[in-house]
Amino acid sequence: MTEGGPDQRIPFGVARTLLAVALAAVAVAGVGLLAWHHALPPRRCAPGMIPLGTRCCGQGQRLDGDRCQGTPTRCADLMVVAATGCHPRRRPIAIAGGRLELGPIDWEAQQRVKPHAAEVPSFAIDSHEVTEGAFAACADRGHCPRLPASGEPGRARANVSAGEAETYCRAQGGSLPTRDQLAFAALGVSGRRYPWGETGAVCRRAAFGLAKGPCATGAQGPELAGSHPEGATPDGVQDLAGNVAEWTAPTDGRSSVRGGGWADGSAADLRSWSFVMMRADERSPTVGFRCAYPPEAATGRTGGHLPSEED
C-alpha cells in the first residue's frame, strides 16, 4: 500500500482497454462530425451576409419574393450598409498592361477556344459590376434610358443591351471593355484559370449555379454586386466570374459576353476563357456589364463622372 491508503493504480491491461475505448469513441465522433459537415449545404454567402432562399442578403434583412428587403446591420467586406440595402464600394482598379495569352489551357477549353495573343496596354476597370442604382442615377441625370428594375439598388444591372451599357459607360468617361481587356482582367499575365486563381470554383467565390444547382435552386435574377469578395482577382476586381456575364465592346453588331452568370451550373462557365457570342441588341437576365477607363482614372486624374459608392 502507498502512504495514506490503498494502492489506486489501474492494472496495465485495464488501462489499455480503457484507452482503446476512448480512442474508438473519439474516432466515431470524428466520423459523425465529418458526415454532418458534408451533409450541410455549400457555404455560398460571405461573412456579413446570410443565405435567404437563393439570395445572400445583408444581416438583419428579410426576403420578399426574390428581393432582400430592409436596412441591413452588416454586409460583406467592401460593401456599404445603407437604408436601401447593401451596395458595393465601386471604384476604378488599375490594370497594368501586359501580354494576353488566351488559349485552350485545360481540356474543357479544347475545341472552344482559339489561341489568341495580344499586347494589352494599361487601363482601369470597375471594381464591381454596374448596379441597378448606378444605372438609375445615370437615367436621373438624363444620360441613360430608364429600364425596369428589381427594386434593389445594389443588385447587378441585367437585362441591358450592349448599346445601353455603352451609353452608360460613355457618360462615366469610359467605355465598354474590349474583349482583350475583360479577358486580361480575369486571366492576368499568368493565365489564371479562374479570376481568383487556378482552383476553387465553389459557391462562396462566385454567384453561379443558383437556378438548378449546385449552389441553390429557383433563382430569378442576379445577386448583389460584390457579395462574393472571396472571388476577387489579385488586383481586387470582383465578380469577373458569375453573377452576370459581362458585355464587351461590340463589333459588327455582335459581342462576346464573358464570365458566366448566376444561372450557369458548370464550373467551366466560370473559367477565364469562357465566353458566349450574342447580338449587341439582345437583353438577358443573366447578362450585365462593367466599364473600362483610361489608366489615370484609377488615380482620379480624368474627366467625366467616375463611379463611386454613392451611385
Image (spheres, rainbow, N blue to C red):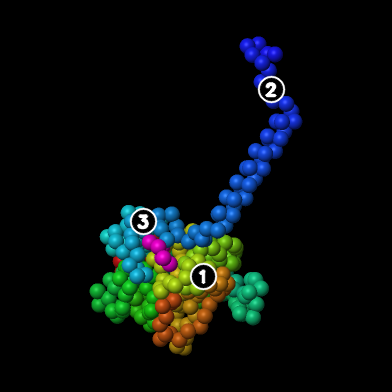
Specify whether residue 251 is in view.
Answer: no
Mark 3 is surrounded, within 10 Å at the Cα level, by few (under 14), some (14 to 19) or many (20 or more) other residues, namely many
Q: Earlier in the sequence, mark 1 or mark 2?
A: 2
Range of the magenta residues?
52-57
Q: Secondary structure at mark 3?
A: loop
In the image, what residue type sits under mark 3? Gln
Per the model, the C-alpha gap separating discs 1 and 3 is 24 Å
> Which three-letter amino acid code belongs to the residue tagged 1?
Gly
| Disc 1 + disc 2, Cβ < 8 Å | no
Residue bearing mark 2: 9
Check if residue 196 falls in the magenta segment. no
Q: Which of the marked residues, 1 or 3, is nearer the chain's N terminus? A: 3
Q: Position of residue 304 (x, y in %)?
A: 32, 70
Pointers 2 and 3 in contact (CB under 8 A)?
Answer: no
Percent from the top left, x then y, of residue 221? 40, 73
Q: Residue furthest front?
A: 6
- The answer for how far apart the CA atoms under marks 2 and 3 are is 56 Å
